Amino acid sequence: MRILHLTDFHFNEGWFAWLATQAPSCDLICYTGDFLDIFSPVPASIQIQKVTQWISRVAPPFLFCSGNHDVEAKGARDGAWLKDLVSTHRWGDGTRLMRDCSAFLSSGWGTACRSDRPVNVLLRHAPPGDCATALSSITHSEWGDFGLGEDLRAGVIKADIVLSGHVHNPQGWHDRCGPAWSFNPGISSAGNVPNYILLDLTRRRAQWYVDNEPVDACYW
């Protein structure tokens, strides 16, 4: 099973267009939050209208979790608008999904991350705390979810893979968090194409792309 992992488009129309027309083929698109941009001069109501249109053009299946911009933007109604993105083969916050014998869980921004059963892939906007995926390579600040990191290391939450975003320039695009692997593709704001990661769950391989070019790979 091939997963396309993307994150933090922040109302970049070109990236949404690329996702709808030029993205590599995969079995499931996993998007880890921040469709909107709090700092954009475009009002959130207009951003929501346009993002909803853009996402409707993206071929499903599509699984997403909310990010802080999606929930906290003025006029975003605490993320209630995200329910309009959900359809038969498009799923959002709180979804537990089975695809090709793999269990996926989407955990929304501002909610407690809990799972009473193990999952293969967890979507959570902020990476697990105290991981390279949660540390900024520019400011060296930590922007991770420390509760999630502690729960993964203690086995309270059992996940093989955690897909995240939030930190735009992470010190590492992958890292271990106890028995789990954490992935964050980061973003290149000036790029015509978003950063992305292709994960092959069968081969247990992840490939990181920047400017649509493969940069690094790892096996887990």
Image (cartoon, rainbow, N blue to C red):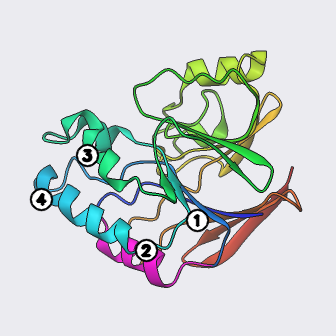
Q: CA distance from mark 1 to mark 4?
A: 26 Å
Q: Residues within 10 Å of mark 4 (few under 14, many from 20)?
A: few
> Of tags 4 and 3, which is closer to the observer?
3
**Could you tell me residue 175's position as x and y percent?**
73, 42
Amino acid at dot 2:
Gly
**Residue 72 vertical position relative to residue 190 in the rendered view, above or below:** above
| Viewer-side residue, 209 vs 21 | 21
Q: Which residue is mark 3?
A: 81
For the residue labelled by badge 2, is the local secondary structure a helix, a strand or a loop?
loop
Q: Which residue is mark 4?
A: 42
Q: CA distance from mark 2 to mark 3?
A: 28 Å
User: Which residue appears at 48% of the width and 44% of the height?
Assistant: 167
Q: Which residue is mark 1?
A: 196
Residue 79, numbered circle: none
Q: Which residue is mark 2?
A: 191
Amino acid at dot 3:
Trp
Q: What is the number of callouts on the image?
A: 4
Q: CA distance from mark 2 to mark 4?
A: 21 Å
In reply to whether residue 170 is colored magenta, the answer given is: no
Q: Are marks 1 and 3 in contact (CB under 8 Å)?
A: no
**Could you tell me residue 109's position as x and y percent?**
42, 33
Question: In which quarter of the view is residue 114 placed?
Answer: top right
